[in-house]
Image: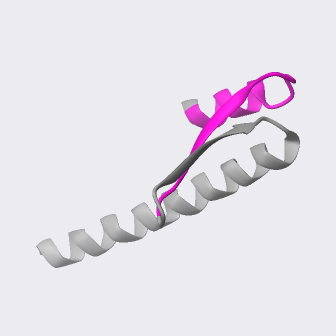
Amino acid sequence: MTEKREFLRKTSFRPNRFFYGCNSKSNHCKYLKFSPNVNVSVIYIQLNFHKILTFFDVDKRLLDE
């Protein structure tokens, strides 16, 4: 498990924790209170972002050859 996911897993159920989230499309940032639903959303977004990065990494390797 990566450090970020491990951090989120450990802190997700503490009542007074905050998460600073940014919307990359609008550059709108805000503080979100930790809750089980927010934590699941953050992990889901992180996993999808990792898949996108992996896709571009593979695509870059193909272009370099």
28 to 14, vertically: above or below: below
Q: Is residue 12 magenta?
A: yes
Report x, y in % for residue 53.
Answer: 41, 61
Measuring 80% from the left and 31% from the top, which residue is drawn there? 12
54 to 8, vertically: above or below: below
Q: Nearer the viewer, residue 37 or 57?
A: 37
32 to 47, vertically: above or below: above
> Left or right: 65 with respect to 35?
left
Measuring 76% from the left and 43% from the top, which residue is drawn there? 39
> Left or right: 33 with respect to 61?
right
The magenta segment: 4-24
Q: Residue furthest left?
A: 65
50 to 64, vertically: above or below: above
> Left or right: 57 with respect to 45?
left
Report x, y in % for residue 63.
Answer: 17, 77
Report x, y in % for residue 3.
Answer: 56, 30
Judging from the image, the colouring scheme is one colour
